[in-house]
Image (cartoon, helix red, strand yellow):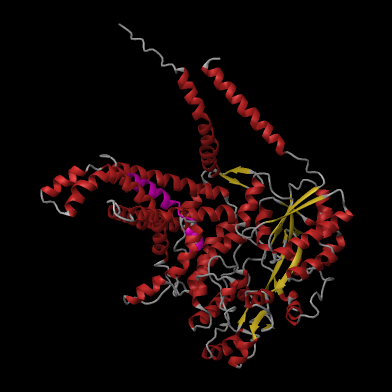
């Protein structure tokens, strides 16, 4: 054989080998559901046990369907999910939160969950839970959990300073000097660029009566008297030393946070159970109502499972999602994970736990974000500007005007 | 008129076999380097969704770039980062290579230790340096001991960029030591000995003999380190996330954010193309300025 012929023969062998190897990887995806979830149940053992018993329970009803629950790490979850979807190796459904819904909807990735859930399940959801995952009138995620970021106060700090939990901004400013004299911060504000604006600036904006986006979602509404008022209030907390300044730029591991170290009276950017986990128990936590300025509002976590348009077997996904959102599974899931149910018929999950029972009362007062396809882009514009205000490098008026100017072409599309 | 026949060069049997051995690497290069790069350039002229839909937009993404103050800030931050980290990396590498050039007890250990940061996880380095630069960390303590006020450099819009650039120097200087050291071994000893006999001092010997000999290695390092500094991401991601405010928001960090947080792959592609052109221009300038005699 001559040189070029040898080369062609070698290439043919390589191509044939590759084809055979590729063929080994193909599989029949009918009657199979693949779901990506994350460590929402923080104890890995409990997480594995929950999904094992849930899948077993489902298989008793649908032995013909195989469910693969894949637990992924939280880090870079958007990057890994989008890469998998782009490569055609994505799951049929995945855990999503309202901040993600707008973007995935905008990319034509999600299917409306009306096609996948029984009518009575949809009708049973709390309005704010379903509203947070609704785009153009259709919900795109089946909520499975909720949490209210009501106040979590350290009873030892309150007792030491001789103060009561605040109910309003005015109360907070009134007790802050007492707390400062006793060596404590009144609250925390997490201002680093990885921190959620929902859990920080936005809830103060909502309490002031403001909104992030206009009603139609095509312009920024945060550049308003309410927005300026919220920023001025936060700036006062920073300037007077009522919050820890380093938290404006640095993130903390939960167990290293000022609250976990017993340096703070009340926090509003973590759920009471998360605060308890960081503090080693909830025995020193007293749940306080969400703060009020013009209205009483708190950020509410909502999480659920969204179905991708490329789901291999919609019938199997429908059966699995219906089971997953049933009252029985939802109760088990939330009790195991330490959350609340977004279904109105599933309540009183923690009758013997005073902290969780109290927190559950505020679920309907929560705002789980403002769904918008450009939510994340606006966060990336607004977060550094809010940080600049709190670090004293911009005035609230200038920062919000700049945010509006930068966001305008993005929101206009 | 006479014509001269030039015989076509034919590959020998060994040449074909050689080509066959090179071919897999060449195909891999085409598939995994050139292909994605070309894809990135094409993306910059389109809007691309995760679902695979492409809408061609012409120069729209580039027009957005020009009008985006965030892009100009990221470009400035990237250049300042490079201006801090590249010279410091090369100075540190040259200095330490000269110190460990001679054979002395423990020289090999030192050389290995200098190379350790190169193979250390950048994420881990970022976490450790976040503590080092914190108000409670050793950097603040050291500055305080010489009269500077205690401050967390990563909280400062002025010092955050120098801080992450210093970490960049720490992660890269070991590679430079290796390159400079290899070149130093090639310099004939008799040149320096002759200069010594003629009464040249250490600085004169370094400036007149060592430095000219090091020129090719230094040129190589400038190109490599500039390219690396333009791609700085991991430590910034861990230490500052581009902040405070936008003080450490580099082009690569913007590219990452636009693609995987905002799903704006076309715009991210445009940033990538600008980064490529910038790297190319800087490499060409460096070649003209430093490379002529190398």
| Residue A151 found in image quarter | bottom right
Query: Residue at coordinates 53% horizontally, 63% vertically from top-left?
Result: A381
Note whether A286 is above or below B206 in the view shown: below
Q: Residue furthest front?
A: B105
Residue A225 percent location from the top left of the image? 57, 76
| Residue A16 found in image quarter | top right
Residue A165 percent location from the top left of the image? 65, 87
Note whether A27 is above or below A10 in the view shown: below
Indicate the quadrant containing the C terminus of chain B: top left, top right, bottom left or bottom right: top left
Count of marks, rendered view: 0
Q: Is residue B221 magenta?
A: yes
Residue A291 seen from this side: no
Note whether A135 is above or below B184 in the view shown: below
Specify the principal SS of the magenta part. helix
Task: From the viewer's side, name the closer residue of A1 and B207.
Answer: A1
Query: Residue at coordinates 43% horizontally, 16% vertically from top-left?
Result: B10
Q: Residue furthest left?
A: B198
Q: Is residue B111 magenta?
A: no
Indicate the quadrant containing the N terminus of chain B: top left, top right, bottom left or bottom right: top left
* A170 relative to B242 in the view: left or right: right
Task: From the viewer's side, name the closer residue of A107 and B60.
Answer: A107
Q: Which residues are magenta?
A: B219-240
Q: Residue furthest right?
A: A61
| Residue B8 found in image quarter | top left
Residue A30 seen from this side: yes
Query: Residue at coordinates 54% horizontally, 56% vertically from top-left?
Result: B257
Residue A10 percent location from the top left of the image? 58, 24
Residue A138 percent location from the top left of the image? 76, 58
Note whether B200 is above or below A190 in the view shown: above
* B22 relative to A268 in the view: left or right: left
Query: Residue at coordinates 39% horizontally, 50% vertically from top-left?
Result: B175
């Amino acid at each position: 054989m001559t040189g070029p012929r040898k080369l062609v023969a070698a290439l043919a062998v390589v191509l044939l080998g590759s084809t055979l190897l590729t063929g080994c990887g193909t599989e029949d995806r009918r009657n199979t559901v693949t779901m990506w979830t994350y460590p929402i149940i923080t104890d890995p053992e409990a997480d594995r046990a929950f999904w094992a018993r849930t899948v077993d329970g489902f298989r008793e009803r649908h032995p013909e369907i195989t469910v693969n629950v894949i637990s992924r790490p939280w880090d870079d979850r958007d990057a890994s999910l989008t890469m998998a979807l782009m490569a055609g190796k994505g799951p049929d459904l995945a855990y999503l939160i309202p901040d993600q819904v707008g973007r995935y909807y905008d990319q034509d990735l999600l299917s409306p969950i009306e096609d996948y859930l029984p009518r009575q399940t949809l009708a049973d959801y709390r309005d704010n839970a379903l509203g947070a995952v609704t785009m153009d009138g259709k919900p795109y995620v089946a909520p499975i959990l909720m949490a209210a970021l009501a106040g979590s106060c350290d009873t030892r700090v309150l007792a030491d300073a001789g103060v009561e939990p605040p109910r309003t901004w005015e109360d907070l400013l009134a007790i802050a000097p007492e707390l400062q004299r006793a060596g404590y911060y009144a609250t925390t504000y997490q201002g680093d660029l990885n921190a959620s604006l929902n859990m920080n600036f936005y809830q103060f904006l909502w309490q002031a009566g403001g909104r992030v986006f206009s009603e139609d979602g095509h312009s920024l509404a945060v550049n308003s008297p309410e927005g300026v008022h919220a920023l001025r209030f936060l700036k006062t907390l920073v300037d007077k030393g009522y919050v820890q300044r380093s938290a404006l730029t640095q993130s903390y591991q939960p167990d290293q946070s000022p609250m976990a170290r017993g340096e703070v009276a009340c926090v509003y950017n973590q759920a009471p159970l998360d605060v308890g986990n960081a503090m080693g128990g909830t025995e020193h936590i007293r749940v306080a109502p969400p703060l009020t300025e013009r209205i009483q509002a708190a950020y509410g976590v909502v999480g659920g499972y969204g179905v991708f348009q490329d789901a291999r077997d919609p019938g199997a996904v429908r059966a699995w999602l219906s089971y997953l959102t049933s009252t029985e599974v939802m109760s088990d899931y939330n009790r195991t994970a330490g959350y609340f149910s977004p279904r109105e018929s599933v309540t009183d999950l923690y009758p013997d736990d005073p902290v969780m029972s109290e927190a559950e009362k505020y679920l309907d007062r929560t705002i789980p974000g403002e769904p918008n396809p450009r939510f994340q882009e606006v966060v990336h514009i607004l977060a550094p500007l809010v940080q600049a205000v709190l670090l004293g490098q911009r005035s609230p008026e200038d920062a919000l005007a700049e945010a509006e100017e930068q966001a305008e072409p993005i929101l206009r599309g | 008129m006479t014509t001269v026949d030039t015989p076509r060069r034919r590959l020998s049997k060994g040449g074909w076999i050689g080509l066959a051995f090179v071919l897999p690497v060449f195909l891999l290069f085409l598939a995994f380097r050139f292909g994605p790069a070309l894809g990135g350039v094409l993306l910059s002229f389109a809007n691309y969704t995760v679902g695979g839909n492409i809408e061609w937009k012409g120069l729209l993404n580039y027009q957005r770039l020009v009008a985006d103050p965030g892009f100009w800030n990221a470009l400035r931050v990237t250049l300042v980062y490079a201006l801090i980290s590249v010279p410091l990396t090369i100075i540190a590498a040259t200095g330490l290579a000269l110190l460990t050039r001679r054979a002395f007890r423990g020289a090999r250990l030192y050389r290995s230790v200098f190379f350790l940061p190169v193979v250390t996880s950048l994420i881990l380095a970022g976490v450790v340096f976040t503590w080092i630069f914190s108000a409670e960390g050793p950097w603040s303590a050291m500055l305080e001991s010489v009269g500077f006020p205690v401050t967390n450099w990563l909280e400062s819009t002025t010092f955050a960029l120098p801080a992450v650039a210093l970490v960049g120097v720490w992660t890269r200087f070991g590679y430079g030591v290796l390159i400079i050291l290899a070149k130093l071994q090639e310099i004939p000893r008799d040149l320096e000995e002759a200069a010594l006999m003629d009464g040249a001092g250490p600085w004169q010997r370094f400036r007149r003999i060592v430095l000219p000999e090091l020129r090719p290695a230094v040129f190589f390092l400038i190109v490599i380190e500039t390219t690396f500094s333009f791609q700085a991401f991991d430590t910034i991601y861990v230490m500052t996330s581009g902040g405070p405010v936008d003080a450490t928001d580099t082009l690569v960090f913007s590219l990452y954010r636009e693609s995987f947080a905002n799903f704006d792959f076309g715009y991210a592609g445009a940033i990538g193309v600008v980064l490529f052109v910038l790297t190319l221009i800087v490499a060409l300038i460096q070649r003209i300025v430093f490379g002529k005699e190398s």
